[in-house]
Image (cartoon, helix red, strand yellow):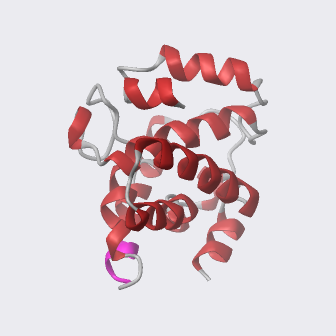
Amino acid sequence: ALLSTLAAKSEETEEHAERLQHYCGLLGKLLGISNKELDEMSLFAMLHDIGKVGINDAILRKPGALTDQEWLEMKKHPEIGFRIAQNNVDLAPISEYILSHHERRDVKGYPRGLCGEEIPVLSRILAIVDAFDAMTNERIYSKPKSAEEAAEEILRCAGTQFDPTLAKMF
């Protein structure tokens, strides 16, 4: 039900979620994370943007750049998602990952401005995979890049936006 609501509300598709699950799972296995964490990663990949159900449709579907006010509104989705997950016994274990999926290694992320290892590893994995998927698939606000161009961008942002070790592994 949550996935259906999210799909109706934003550009998130089942295919997007499946691609994230696939790549996150591969990277998680390379890192040697536990089976429990792999299961959490799969659920997290599907529902990381569930907080977008609380964001105005006009903002979610806007084809151009967001205004400063619209951007402030959009930046609330990790906290909204966190609250949704916290209130569901099955999703509570991934709530912290949802809250942290837009944090950046250089503390320029949101909502808490976490740094480096303060960001849960599953959130750091998803940040890379989600950025890659956003860059390589058409969005209402951008044309797709090639996989090579997207990989170069991820490596260029390693150490600032992304965990450098994970970026290289990806």
Q: Residue at x 55, y 52 (%)?
A: 25
- Viewer-closest of 89 and 2: 89
The secondary structure that most of the magenta stretch takes on is helix
Q: Residue at x 68, y 51 (%)?
A: 19
**In the image, residue 119 above or below residue 55:** above
Span shown in magenta: 83-88
Q: Position of residue 108 (x, y in %)?
A: 31, 29
- Viewer-closest of 46 and 87: 46
Q: Can the viewer see residue 161?
A: no
Q: Position of residue 143 (x, y in %)?
A: 78, 30
Res 89 quadrant in image: bottom left
Q: Which quadrant, please, contains the N terminus?
A: bottom right
Q: Can the viewer see residue 98?
A: yes
Q: Position of residue 128 (x, y in %)?
A: 51, 36
Number of numbered discs visible in the structure rendering:
0
Could you tell whether 134 is left or right of 130 in the image? Answer: right
Q: Is residue 134 magenta?
A: no
Res 12 quadrant in image: bottom right
Could you tell whether 118 is left or right of 65 in the image? Answer: left
Q: Which quadrant, please, contains the C terminus?
A: top right
Q: Position of residue 67 (x, y in %)?
A: 52, 36
Q: Residue at x 79, y 39 (%)?
A: 138
**In the image, residue 41 above or below residue 160:** below
- Viewer-closest of 118 and 50: 118
Q: Residue at x 60, y 16 (%)?
A: 152
Q: Is residue 87 magenta?
A: yes
**In the image, residue 55 above or below residue 121:** below
